[in-house]
Image (tube, rainbow, N blue to C red):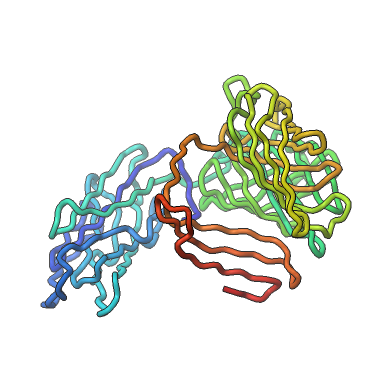
Amino acid sequence: MELRMTMFGTRINFAILAFLGGLFAGCGGGYSQQPVTPPPVTPPPGTQSVVLTIDQLPPPTIQRGQTVSVSAKISPETVGFVNWTCTGATDCGSFLPGSTQIPFYPGFDDSEVTTSYTAPASAPVGTEIMVIATLATDSSKTASASTVISQAASNATLTGQYALLLNSPVGSRGTASLLGSVQFNGDGTIANGVIDIVSPSLLDLKDQILATGSNPPPNTSSYSVGADGHGSLQIRTAGGKQLSFSFVLTSPSHALITEIDGAPGSGTMDLQQSLAGGFATSQVTGGFSFTMTGTAKSNGSTKVSSGGVFTADGASTLSNGTLDVNTAGGMSSSTFSGSFTAPDSNGRGTLQLGATRSLTYYIISEKALRIFEADSSDLMGGSAYAQGHSVTFLGDNYFYQHSGWSPTGRTVTAGEFKIVEGDSDISGGISDSNSGGFPTT
């Protein structure tokens, strides 16, 4: 799902057509297959109402000629075939196989079938292709997914200002954060920018990024993007820093990025959205929730995490603030009011939480900020997100990931849980973790 480039391109909608004992018809210009006659099988009783859903979605965007896996889930389990088709254009792509037999295992609740989809090699940019299929036994039941044909990535894919946030473990309990803003010119060169490094061993604030010069890389700021969206970034700063990164674009506005010059940092790179006249305080308006992680300023081995909420008035004032801090397992909670300054040309400004905590922010959009704390209290980095206005909580399956330190070392945990709509209890879930190299469940 992660190699995605949302270039201005062709939209393809997939649909799955399950003929329980039916036929397959290939799309024009795509893969075609002779009609499939499934072997005579007597369906088990109670499977007349079959529900078909997309289980493995294609990526939201796909390059021309790229092949991806797509799967469907059939519930309750039954026998027959799932036929994969697309229509609506001369060439909408191909499926292999074009018809997949549903495996039947008595006692199982559902079955899954998988095929490979190959995007068309020359779909016209801007053409919308609609692919629709229907469950043969009930035309009201369909399953569909969509993807967008994109052009190949290039240096031009990165044009504009992008905000960085990377975190990395340091020392026995520490966490370092790197934040910043970079101006990409769309041709492999960099115009300007700024970075902040917040670490127990290094505090480098507002270090200006030097523009691409005449020196060859890596002795100057530069970047490159391959056709598959994989790229590299070199940053040289006025303070003498030479930083190297590798990244993969998921779209022209978002990338996953890792530092490759020795520091084990990883994180995200996001296109910053300013207003017509530039970044403005009006972009910091409404309720925000935030989290940060790092260390105590006085002791780099003391792990600290924080979270909270505040309301910004879009001018200079913060109110209705609550801050929760976990310092090496000790919890504290407090309320605050405060202020914030206008963002500069990098989208960078400050947040004052009460009398003692000073944060710096970078604007991604009106819905997201990257933030860090580098004051006399703690050294932390994280994000703030605009809160929705709905008072309705919708139950569903949720996935989570978090990391920290335990007596055995660094711990990373991921899992999922379910909350039934209208209920406040977690009805079930699973958690997997790696604690100091020892996996637990």
Q: Quadrant of the C terminus?
A: bottom right
The residue closer to the viewer here, 145 or 26, is 145
Residue drawn 75% across and 46% down?
A: 216
- Kindly give the residue lying farthest to the bottom in the view shown: 106
Q: Would residue 138 be visible to someone looking at this image?
A: yes
Residue 382 as seen in the image, left or right of residue 378: left
The residue closer to the viewer here, 83 or 283, is 283
Residue 290: give x, y in percent of width and height.
64, 43
Residue 329 position by quadrant? bottom right
Above-or-below relation of 324 to 419: above
- Kindly give the residue lying farthest to the top in the view shown: 277
Above-or-below relation of 405 to 368: below
Residue drawn 52% across and 49% down?
A: 250
Residue 438: give x, y in percent of width and height.
66, 76
Q: How many marks?
A: 0
The residue closer to the viewer here, 432 or 144, is 432
Residue 272: give x, y in percent of width and height.
60, 35
Residue 91 as seen in the image, left or right of residue 161: left
Residue drawn 87% across and 55% down?
A: 299
Above-or-below relation of 412 to 372: below
The residue closer to the viewer here, 12 or 286, is 286
Q: Would residue 207 be visible to someone looking at this image?
A: no
- Kindly give the residue lying farthest to the right in the view shown: 298
Residue drawn 35% across and 53% down?
A: 119
Residue 217: give x, y in percent of width and height.
74, 48
